Image: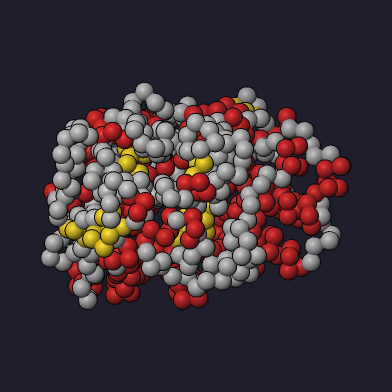
Amino acid sequence: MKRLSYILFPILLLTGSFWSCKKALEQPPLGSLSETIIANKNGVNGLLIGAYAGLYGMQGKDQGFGGTDAWQASPSNWVFGAIAGGDASKGSDGSDQPAIDPIANFYSDGTNAFYNGKWKALYEGVFRTNNVLKFLGRATDIQAADHSNIEGQARFLRAHFYFELKKMWNMVPYTDETTTDFNQPNNTDIWPKIEADLKFAYENLPGTQSEIGRANKWAAGTYLAKAYLYQHKFAQAKAIFDVVIPQGTTTSGKKYALNEAFADNFTPSKEDNPEVVFAIQMAANADPNGPSKGNNGDMLNFPYGESPFGCCGFFQPSIDLVNHFRTNETTGLPYLTDYNSHPIKNDMNISGDQNFDPDQGTIDPRLDWTAGRRGVPYLDWGNYPGKPWIRSQLYGGPYGPKKNIFWQATQATDGDFSTWAPGSSINYLVIRFADVLLMAAECEAQVGSPDKAQEYVNLVRARAASPKSWVYKYIDDDNPLKGFSDEPAANYKVGAYPAGDFASKGKNYALSAIYYERKIELAMEGHRFFDLVRWGIADQELNAYFSFQGKLTQDVSRGKFNAARNSYYPIPQRQIDLSQAGGAPVLKQNPGYN
């Protein structure tokens, strides 16, 4: 199967999105020559590829759409989903990218540039998908099956962009391919529009595609179930999961399943695997001007100091997150309510030349694929050295990110060093099958099927328990490229929930176990904040996080979450200012930010 190359279609350069910086009336219309070129099969397919390129959220080596910084619009949501959810500290130090601090501590307002950067990127994606649909309707040389496939992909992508907008800001303006007045208000719930696009895609897309980056029927069905889940339509979501889980396949035709090894989810050479539901395709060294296709939205998120990556020390796993991976030495189960009372030993305030022995207690091995910690192999780059690779432990803590890091042995193909910070060919997984199982478990628990919910959770835990998902010590610590021994790098122990556990202990216990499993399985993948909000527990979880983590690192010492205000981010003030009509703004600010 070929990999879809997300090139920018040249005709897109002739158009401009209102949401990028200007009002619609200020945009030059498409001329007759442009329509002649575009309104046919080749032109529409080119526009569709351009719409996929919009998934990157950026247009240059370190720029987002409209001249913003690439990391403001990263599709991984490392700021808005992971840092804001307590998975990670901002990292680096307090003077670098200071606009992230008020987001992490929940005292930001609509003037924060990160919100405007993300807004512009997502509406650029909407604009591109609408263009596909508009010119698809005018093309006369496209067969019915191809027409449905193109329309299904475009509507899937549009639903994705609007889903991101919805979970970020809740009430947002809606435009489609028929819109002529782009100065729309944000006074209507867009969930029905998202559902309609995903239903069409689910019913009309084929099960396989010719290129692995494209959306297929099963990705659309899964996304539709996710949209239902976010609205607490658990029975409707369950009905789709009941079909997707046994029947669904990847775009290349592989039956959905968990990878045998947890780390295969983050290994470029294994990206066409059965766990991929929908991924944003990254490619290192594809752009001579910089890693524009190499996930440069995450280019800040590599170890710093004496590390081989050069820049920039952001996105450090929080101490609170790492403590979630402690397991009970007898049962192998997590400590659902008092994990911070069973902390994992760390090297906070210990210099690199001082001795440090890693934690000897029982640990979930997913930790060592998620966080770099002192004395444990950091892929094949050597044992993580701690402080020498960190800008400021006092500010961001003792750990380093790991899921976004490529291997030393494959850095020539998987890393991109063409500019001042690294790029990577590691795909961003929008949805993977472990996520599907845990969403389905949540639905089962909500509708009164605790045993089925527990079955799904135990499937995810069984993969973590397998020795194939463990990290192993090096054969030679001084030469990590020689490979790994058969000695585990830590005392790994993961157990299954015993038969009948969810049923006997009740719905609240089952949900707490499912929520916890999502925390550790999907850690640092950008989901946590949005999960906490939809579960209605963001205030208790995040304020507990600030109370604990704020005593250990300086970055969240000011943290305070107010559910009435902070459950959604502020509408960018720049967009409100641009939406003037009759001397008043059309867009309304979210509650609590005026």
Q: Considering depth in this image, is 256 or 376 the residue closer to the camera? A: 376
Is residue 293 toward the left or the right of residue 380 in the image?
right
Is residue 140 toward the left or the right of residue 108 in the image?
right
Residue visible at 61% across and 35% down?
A: 289
In this orientation, does residue 109 appear?
A: yes
Up-down relation of residue 255 to residue 163 (above or below): below
Task: Give the number of callouts.
Answer: 0
Q: Position of residue 6 (x, y in %)?
A: 63, 49
Up-down relation of residue 72 to residue 221 (above or below): above
Quadrant of the rendering where the N terminus is positioned: bottom right
Residue visible at 79% across and 66% down?
A: 143
Q: Position of residue 242 (x, y in %)?
A: 45, 74
Quadrant of the rendering where the C terminus is positioned: top left
Residue visible at 49% across and 58% down?
A: 269
Is residue 264 toward the left or the right of residue 450 in the image?
right
> What kind of colouring is applied to the model shown?
secondary structure
Q: Quadrant of residue 14?
A: top right
Q: Considering depth in this image, is 81 or 224 the residue closer to the camera? A: 81
Q: Considering depth in this image, is 525 or 366 the residue closer to the camera? A: 366
Up-down relation of residue 582 to residue 188 (above or below): above
Residue visible at 49% across and 31% down?
A: 420
Q: Position of residue 227 (x, y in %)?
A: 48, 58
Q: Position of residue 294 (x, y in %)?
A: 53, 44
Is residue 188 toward the left or the right of residue 549 in the image?
right
In this orientation, does residue 378 appear?
A: no
